[in-house]
Image (cartoon, rainbow, N blue to C red):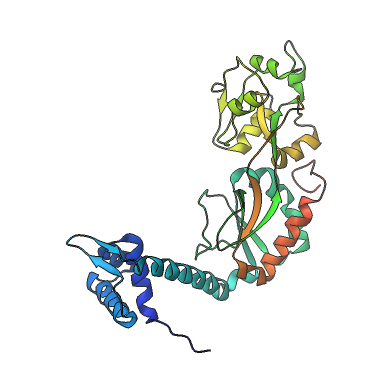
Amino acid sequence: MSRKLPPLTTLPAFEAAARHLNFTKAAEELFVTHGAISRAIKNLEQQLGTTLFERGTRSVRLTAVGEPYARAVREALDQLAVATNVATTRRSDTTLTVSTSGGFAGKWLVPRLYRFHRAHSEIDVRVSTTGTLTTFLGDGIDVAIRYGGGDYPGLTSEFLAGEDVSPVCSPRLMEGEHPLRSPEDLKYHTLIRDDYPIDWAAWLDSAGVVGIGSNGGLAFDSYTFAIEAAVQGEGVALGRTMLIEGDLVAGRLIRPFEHALKARSSFYLVYPPEAIRQRKVKAFRDWIFSEIGKSPLAVSGPN
């Protein structure tokens, strides 16, 4: 099939200029001169027979034709970058890089990775918890575990699990002068907080509890640290279903109350559609879904 294509070398210049709405910034990004950007866009406009930018004295803006064309070019370049990354990354056969949150890595993924390694000893797993949302465009990430609504345009998104949120604490807090018998008893204990969207204010409100301050206590920017503080008996934390199941089974934590708040977000396995053709991505995908169906771990690794 014959394709009518524009001069392909002009497209990166056009896409960068359209994104920045500034030829100078586009030139800096692509390490070329302002004149090179201007010539590339003029060449593209001549080939298309239309104007893509309205040029002002100190600014440019996309025309009615240029705006949708810029979106299409950006999507095409993104897809090409992903495909190129998949095709040319030689380490992809032996190294799998997984992007996820520190909490999911520390409380769910890492304690189970020994089982993946036993089944696939030829694949080295690298876990990235930088907090940066990967685009899979040349950043070395093969697959991601995201927490959200599951709508990630241009990517394959597979539901892993939802979660409920409820207070958890060390069994020691069920003893002493103020044992946790009802949610109202939380007023006698330290509330452990982290940066999870569902906070103590939301849970207390859903449980119909009033008169308990939700902003004091201990605060952590790491969910793993918050849960460890609860394990050590420092207070009560909000436990998330998937991330505390191992501690519950081991008896390190308990749920003192039945009431749980359903989270709106869920965990999803996310990767570029082309990536599933890689053996290592397919192996990890099949493994994590098999793990979701298994009983919770009572320990943090093999014995």
The correct choice, above or below, for 270 with respect to 186 in the image is: below
Label total for image: 0
The correct choice, above or below, for 184 with respect to 272 in the image is: above
Across and down, in percent, residue 252 comes to 76, 32
Across and down, in percent, residue 69 comes to 40, 70
The quadrant holding residue 192 is top right
Across and down, in percent, residue 244 comes to 72, 38
Residue in view at x 58 percent, y 25 percent: 201
Residue in view at x 71 percent, y 42 percent: 242
Residue in view at x 50 percent, y 51 percent: 132
Asked if residue 147 lies left or right of residue 112, the reply is left
Furthest residue to the bottom? 2
Asked if residue 83 lies left or right of residue 168, the reply is left
Across and down, in percent, residue 246 comes to 76, 40
The correct choice, above or below, for 285 with respect to 291 in the image is: below
Furthest residue to the top? 177
Furthest residue to the left? 57
- Closer to us: 153 or 180: 153
- Closer to us: 219 or 146: 146
